Amino acid sequence: MEILDGKLVAQAVKEKLKKETEQRAKNGKKIPHLAAVLIGNNGASETYVASKVKSCSEIGFKSTLIRLSEDISESQLLNKLNELNEDFDVDGILVQLPLPKHISEEKIIETIFPSKDVDGFHPESVGRMVQGLPTFYPATPYGILLLLEHYKIETKGKHAVVIGRSNIVGRPISIMLSKNEYPGNCTVTVCHSHTPNLKEICLQADIIIAALGKPEFLKADMVKPGSVVVDVGITRIEDSTKKSGFTIKGDVDFQAVSPKCSYITPVPGGVGPMTIAALMMNTFKACLAKDLA
Ligand code: NAD
């Protein structure tokens, strides 16, 4: 069994971007600039946004963190996004989800210009992704592809089982893995909360992407020997022995499942860092597109 080390690969991606960014600076070209919008003070969201801003500074990107209060109105937030849309210096905009209940996620996602949609959630980005046109891939699935690619995992003709069908992970990764290119050309089965025979389906999988948000859901008796297991899940479990007060669990029972796998991602240190690396790639691409405009 080999670990798919997301931390290591994310670092390599960021190093490469750093070199390219330094080169841009030397050539007097624009430096990528990410604007991150954080609403309220949800602990997990704070952590994610802080890592994204930190990655920007490590690479040499500019970043702007916009903190807004939990009770900001939807129209105030839309105005802020329109300002960022119009700001030439800003290349990528991300609004950290989830949003407070009184704000429509759909409206927020649709307001961000597709040219700055580095999270890849805008319907135009999704439509282009489905049709195989150049676009921003959603960061988590894109990070998974980069990881599979780095370890040269064979995907052609393999049966990939995706557990979860959310717009940010399950659905996009299922489309991306079925595309006629590497990493892809898989036969994909998408499972969800209404799939009755999940265990039988998982046992047929060469590649399993677990993205359902249920800690240690995937057990050893659901996995075929030699399979590749990618664990997307991140759930905070109360743990008084930890300084933070919680421990992070993935969707895979790592201890029991890992001995059966050819490759597996750990949690933490697997898909999480790759998501950030992919976001950085998208931000770089958004900036690059302005060279050609
Ligand atoms: P979600 O709640 O939007 O979707 C969960 C999906 O799982 C749903 O489609 C549901 O049908 C399916 N599901 C739920 N219970 C199931 C069951 N018993 N059997 C089969 N399918 C079931 O979640 P999400 O936003 O896609 O996130 C999933 C997990 O991935 C969460 O733990 C989240 O924190 C994590 N996540 C991690 C990253 C990362 O960077 N590593 C990024 C995004 C999400």
Image: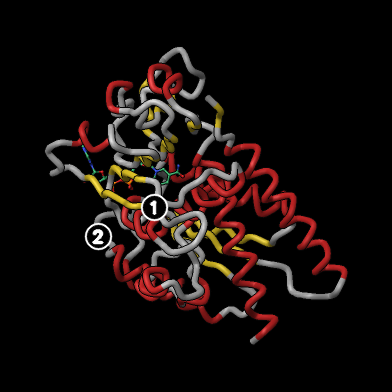
Q: Amino acid at mark 1?
A: Cys
Q: Which residue is mark 2?
A: 102
Residue 28 occupies quadrant? bottom right
Which residue occupies the extreme front position in the image? 157
Which residue occupies the extreme right position in the image? 26
| Secondary structure type for disc 2 | loop
| Residue 190 against residue 132 in the figure, above or below | above
Numbered-mark total: 2
For the C terminus, which image quadrant? bottom right
Q: Amino acid at mark 2?
A: His
Residue 111 in view of the camera: no
The answer to which of 229 and 152 lies nearer the viewer is 152
Q: Residues within 10 Å of mark 1 (few under 14, many from 20)?
A: many
Does mark 2 have its CB less than 8 Å from ligand 1?
A: no
The answer to which of 14 and 181 lies nearer the viewer is 181
The answer to whether 98 appears left or right of 29 in the picture is left
The answer to which of 129 and 50 lies nearer the viewer is 129
Q: Residue at x 46, y 77 (%)?
A: 113
Q: Residues within 10 Å of mark 2 (few under 14, many from 20)?
A: few
The answer to whether 134 appears left or right of 76 in the picture is right
Q: Which residue is mark 1?
A: 186
Q: Residue at x 39, y 54 (%)?
A: 173
The answer to whether 242 appears left or right of 24 in the picture is left
**Residue 158 image offset from top left, x and y in percent:** 39, 46
Residue 131 in view of the camera: yes
- Decide: marks 1, 2 in contact (CB < 8 A)? no
